[in-house]
Image (tube, rainbow, N blue to C red):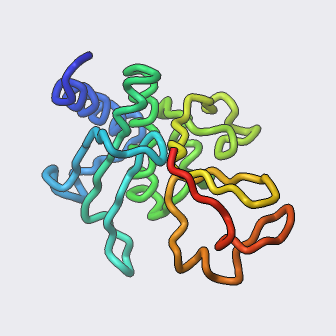
Amino acid sequence: MESNKNIIHKLWEVFWELQETLNFDVWDLIDAEKVVIRISDRFVRGNGLCRIIRTKYSHQVLSCEIVLAKQVLIQYGYDELEHTFRHEVCHLANAILYKDIGHNDNFKSLCRKAGGSMNNQIAGEDYADCATTKLLKAPVRYVYTCPCGSTVKRTKRISSRIRSGLYHSCGKCGISTNHWIESKV
């Protein structure tokens, strides 16, 4: 497998190409040093993330960090990582061109134009050509079992404060979560 440095270099080439494809010039708005591309070993809650810092009132983009999950590269290969990268760059383009965030219609049309991928729920019927099923699932680390036998699988541990509260209970029998048995997977 290629090193992260080589992969990031390839992704920067894709970034330059996308600026022309999407008709936006990020350097007119922010300094080159303020755009960071990272591949993370620890990122497990999705395929990628675009963290954009904007001014409060004018929504001008100040900086951007694009984080991609290394697990996408391991499980699905470079092509899927590049599709995810294209998706995240579209978030940046959406913020610059439309001063908007999220998976709205402007974003979806940019993503289609850029060759990015989206999960089926985001894509919907209108953007089915951009849909992918190659998504990372958050790992199950804890299993909670109710005395009635129903189970709940979670990535994060339910804190003792929440478990002792009256607001969380089994959906099947109604027993409070403080009676559930916790096991680590």
Quadrant in the picture for residue 84: top left
Residue 2 is situated, as x and y percent measured from the top left of the image, at 23, 18
Foreground residue among 53 and 29? 53
Tell me the quarter of the image containing the N terminus: top left
| Residue drawn at x 28%, y 31% as measured from the top left | 11
Quadrant in the picture for residue 82: top left
Decide: is 165 above or below 2.
Answer: below
Q: Is 124 positioned to the left or the right of 132 in the image?
A: right
Decide: is 117 above or below 163.
Answer: above
Residue 131 is situated, as x and y percent measured from the top left of the image, at 63, 32
Q: Residue furthest left?
A: 33
Q: Is 132 positioned to the left or the right of 78 in the image?
A: right
Foreground residue among 143 and 123? 143
Q: Is 34 positioned to the left or the right of 79 in the image?
A: left
Quadrant in the picture for residue 118: top right
| Residue drawn at x 23%, y 32% as measured from the top left | 8
Tally of numbered tags: 0
| Residue drawn at x 33%, y 69% as measured from the top left | 54
Q: Residue furthest right?
A: 173
Residue 28 is situated, as x and y percent measured from the top left of the image, at 23, 55
| Residue drawn at x 36%, y 79% as measured from the top left | 56
Residue 20 is situated, as x and y percent measured from the top left of the image, at 34, 35
Foreground residue among 134 and 139? 139
